[in-house]
Amino acid sequence: MEILYNSMYYVGAAALILIGLYVILVKSNLIKVIIGIHLLDTGVNVLLVSVGYIKGGKAPIFTGTSLGPAQFVDPIPQALVLTAIVIGVGVIALALSIAIKLHEHYGTLDLRRIKELKW
Amino acid sequence: MRKWVSAILLGFVAAGFFIVLSDIPFGNNRMNVAKYYIDNGINETGAVNIVTAVVVNYRALDTLGEVTVLFVASLGLGALLHAGKDGSGNKQRASLVVRTGSRILFPLILLFGAYIFVHGHLTPGGGFQGGAVIASAFLLQYLAYRHYRIDRQKFSMVESISGSAFVVVGLLGLAIGGYFLSNFLDKGVPYSLFSAGVIPVLYVAIGLKVGAELAGIVAGLMESGRG
């Protein structure tokens, strides 16, 4: 229980990633698969930010007050995630547009009924 | 069957997470490169926001690549959804509250987005976040008015000009400072608006580019749903 409490953010991020992977692998509705991709994306972002956290840390922005460099969290994962979120939006939008085209072509979003994608 | 195979696979992934993350204790210490950025960032770049210093100065080349990824995604969406048909509009009219509210909020949201990317080197936020806020203003317009259309040509013009501005600033840095995307302008006084050299210039370019791209994505999805 102690180790679970100490690494709660890791557990949460890993849970999001695993739920996302499960949804991608198991669900047959294309919209649900896209939701799974987004859950996976969010989980990876949370994991990256929580790896850069230090105990009692603040956002790495100098404000001219008493906050010193020793209290700042790691800025590099934040810089990575900042762009990854926007790119995630772009990728999800692209996936949704492919889903729209598939629905126009096959008349369904059920992956079991779209022949070429069956597994 | 498929569920069980997936569950076993996920078990392996979870074990991998546990093995890797048990070597990285939560919330302990930073990497050396992060220490360097925090200790020297404000002197070397003039930016108070260290995340911005990393995104637009130390790692600006990677940001150029990321902007390109977003550009390719929006390009693919435009190519897939480009039907050219004029939809007949939503079946239901938006309520009076939404229409009046969006008329009041639209300029304010645009202003807030611009504020976020202009102050990217001073406060939390920057070009990507400001661009997303600006795109949300256009989404609100689409939700409120059935026959609303953005002018695609003007938006792609803004996108092209701001994307080129990013590269031109980088090439000017190559000519003046000696390497691509070097911070060749005067660093100024930290904590003031006109500081940090090329960082605000680049962030304004990124903000306009991301805003135009995401607004184009919103427009593509909304207009295809209406068709």
Image (cartoon, coloured by chain):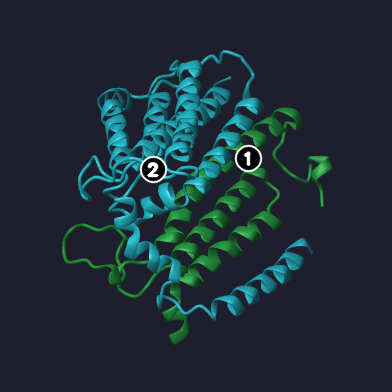
Q: Position of residue B90 (x, y in %)?
A: 49, 21
Tag 2 subunit:
B
The amino acid marked with disc number 2 is Gln
In the depicted structure, whether residue B220 falls above or below residue B128: above
Marking on residue A95: 1
Quadrant that contains the C terminus of chain B: top right
What subunit carries mark 1?
A
* Local SS, label 1: helix
Q: Which chain is cyan?
A: B
| Chain identity for the colour green used in the image | A
Q: Which residue is mark 2?
A: B129
Q: Nearer the viewer, residue B72 or B16?
A: B72
Q: Residue at x 44, y 63 (%)?
A: A49
Height in image: A93 above or below A54?
A: above
Left or right of residue B8, residue B38 in this image: left
Residue at 44%, 53% (x, y): give it.
B58
Disc 2 vs disc 1: Cβ atoms closer than 8 Å? no
Q: Residue at x 49, y 35 (%)?
A: B171
Q: Quadrant of the N terminus of chain B?
A: bottom right
**What's the distance in space between the residues labelled 2 and 1, CA to CA?**
22 Å
Label 2 residue SS: helix
Q: Nearer the viewer, residue B26 or B225?
A: B26
Q: Give the percent coordinates (x, y) of residue A60.
A: 32, 61
Q: Going by the picture, which residue comes out furthest to the bottom?
A: A2
- Closer to us: mark 2 or mark 1? 2
Residue B74 position by quadrant: top right
